[in-house]
Image: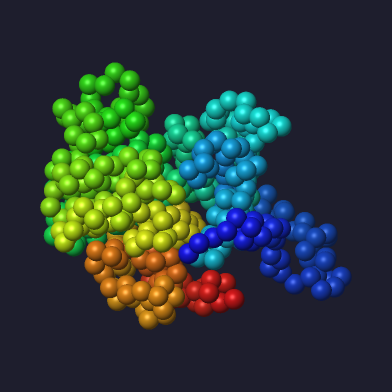
């Protein structure tokens, strides 16, 4: 699929989101209910009982999509204003896929009159989100540069009683773990016996490392632009230092020798063919740099010949796209529905397991027709497609169960939750327009 610049800009004219009024407003009586004098009653109810905030406002299904624009896509620090099309796009995906109302909250702390005035000040972002939090049932952080993004998410998650989720960190990590689980299924290996190399030690790379380890991976080597992040490097701090490996490997090429799984969240064309050839038998290469991967699928196909391997990218024009849209709409759907206070590691691992399991099930005919290709589980299909409606049932269900089981949400009976999701699925806008 080839998109032209004019076609893209025309699509965005006027923005991609707007306000939806959920109650009737057809005459004087409705006006009295919606505003004065009627609105005074829910105001007093909320002041008396905070639980009324969820009953009498949009909070229970509303998520703030917050960005300071310091790490927009692969484009870098272009500011909060330039981030708005992405944040609007995120809101569209929230609604279409998860039936969650998302609203962009661009935070303009790093630029003045279009000029860069410095790096992210974590405390200013934290203060801003804390100030606007009363309206929202969840906070989705987006396109905030590392290392500030780690401090911002961790502190907000500790301070607020609603889920806080930085999608660039955890969204990519959840989908990567799901793909890794199915690589293990195909290669008949367990996660704890894999040698895994991650190239890119920013927000996504660090959290992918943490997710894989949380799920049972034992040997995970993280690389940055200076090579392997190893215990004897003197330039490490923060998250990098936490994940430094005890190894003599120095370069990415060193680390790749005998590796089973390569995960790239770095830069185009940085993985050389000879490094792929040095990997273990039946390897997996997840080259997720956008728009150009660490190594192109055609190049891997040429050097691997008839040898078995699995290839994934971050692009939609190749098989096995590791796409965050498989995660955040459904993670928040489940978290909001059980009033989770956080989206913790058990919930994220549960989402990955649900995604992996769904990919192993037969795909509905209408999904195959939509994508125009065979979607039988195997090397060319290891993670579900975004337009598979079953995601709306399976992932929120897994999230809700894990939230209750881990104590992230109040204890509740979930026996009727799947039926509630099915009813909601019939009325949501996704694929119904």
Q: Residue at x 43, y 65 (%)?
A: 386
Say left or right for 212 vs 85. left
Q: Residue at x 38, y 40 (%)?
A: 267
Task: Give residue 240's quadrant in the image.
Answer: top left
Task: Give residue 233's quadrant in the image.
Answer: top left
Is residue 330 visible in the rendered structure shown here? yes
Say left or right for 20 vs 431. right
Between 231 and 399, the one lying in front of the other is: 231
Residue 322: image x %, image y %? Answer: 37, 56
Q: Residue at x 39, y 53 (%)?
A: 314
Say left or right for 199 vs 33. left
Please, which colouring scheme is shown? Answer: rainbow
Residue 400: image x %, image y %? Answer: 40, 60
Q: Quadrant of the C terminus?
A: bottom right
Q: Is residue 27 above or below residue 14?
A: below
Q: How many marks?
A: 0
Is residue 156 visible in the rendered structure shown here? no
Instruction: Farthest residue to the top: give it.
Output: 234
Residue 35: image x %, image y %? Answer: 80, 60
Q: Residue at x 16, y 61 (%)?
A: 306
Instruction: Farthest residue to the bottom: give it.
Output: 365
Between 100 and 237, the one lying in front of the other is: 237
Q: Is residue 176 above or below residue 231?
A: below
Residue 348: image x %, image y %? Answer: 36, 52
Instruction: Farthest residue to the right: give it.
Output: 28
């Amino acid at each position: 699929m080839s998109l032209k610049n004019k076609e893209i800009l025309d699509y965005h004219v006027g923005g991609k989101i707007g306000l939806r009024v959920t109650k009737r407003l057809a005459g004087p009586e409705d006006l009295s209910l919606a505003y004065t004098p009627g609105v005074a009653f829910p105001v007093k109810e909320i002041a008396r009982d905070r639980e009324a905030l969820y009953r009498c406002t949009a909070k229970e299904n509303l998520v703030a999509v917050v960005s300071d624009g310091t790490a927009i896509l692969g484009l870098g620090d272009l500011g909060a204003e330039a981030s708005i099309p992405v944040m609007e796009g995120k809101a569209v995906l929230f609604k279409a896929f998860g039936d969650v109302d998302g609203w962009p909250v661009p935070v303009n702390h790093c630029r003045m009159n279009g000029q860069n005035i410095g790096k992210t000040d974590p405390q200013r972002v934290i203060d801003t989100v804390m100030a606007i939090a009363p309206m929202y049932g969840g906070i989705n952080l987006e396109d905030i540069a590392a290392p500030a993004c780690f401090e911002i998410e961790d502190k907000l998650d500790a301070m607020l009683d609603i889920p806080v989720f930085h999608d660039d960190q955890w969204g990519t990590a959840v989908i990567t773990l799901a793909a890794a689980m199915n690589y293990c299924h195909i290669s008949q290996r367990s996660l704890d016996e894999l040698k895994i190399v991650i190239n890119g030690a920013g927000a996504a790379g660090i959290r992918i490392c943490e997710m894989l380890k949380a799920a049972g991976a034992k040997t995970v080597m993280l690389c940055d632009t200076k090579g392997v992040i190893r215990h004897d490097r003197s330039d490490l701090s923060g998250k990098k230092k936490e994940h430094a490996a005890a190894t003599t490997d120095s370069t990415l090429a060193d680390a790749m020798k005998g590796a089973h799984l390569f995960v790239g969240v770095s830069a185009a064309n940085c993985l050389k063919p000879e490094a792929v050839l040095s990997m273990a038998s039946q390897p997996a290469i997840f080259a997720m740099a956008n728009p150009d991967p660490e190594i192109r699928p055609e190049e891997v196909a040429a050097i691997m010949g008839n040898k078995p391997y699995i290839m994934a990218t971050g692009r939609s024009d190749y098989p096995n796209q590791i796409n965050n849209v498989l995660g955040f709409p459904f993670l928040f759907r489940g978290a909001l529905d059980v009033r989770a206070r956080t989206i913790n590691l058990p919930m994220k691992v549960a989402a990955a397991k649900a995604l992996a399991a769904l990919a192993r099930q037969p795909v509905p005919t209408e999904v195959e027709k939509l994508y125009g290709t065979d979607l039988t589980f195997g090397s060319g299909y290891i993670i579900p497609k975004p337009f598979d409606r079953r995601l709306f049932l399976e992932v929120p269900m897994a999230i809700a169960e894990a939230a209750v089981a881990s104590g992230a949400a109040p204890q509740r009976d979930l026996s009727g939750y799947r039926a509630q999701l099915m009813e909601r699925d019939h009325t949501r806008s996704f694929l119904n327009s």
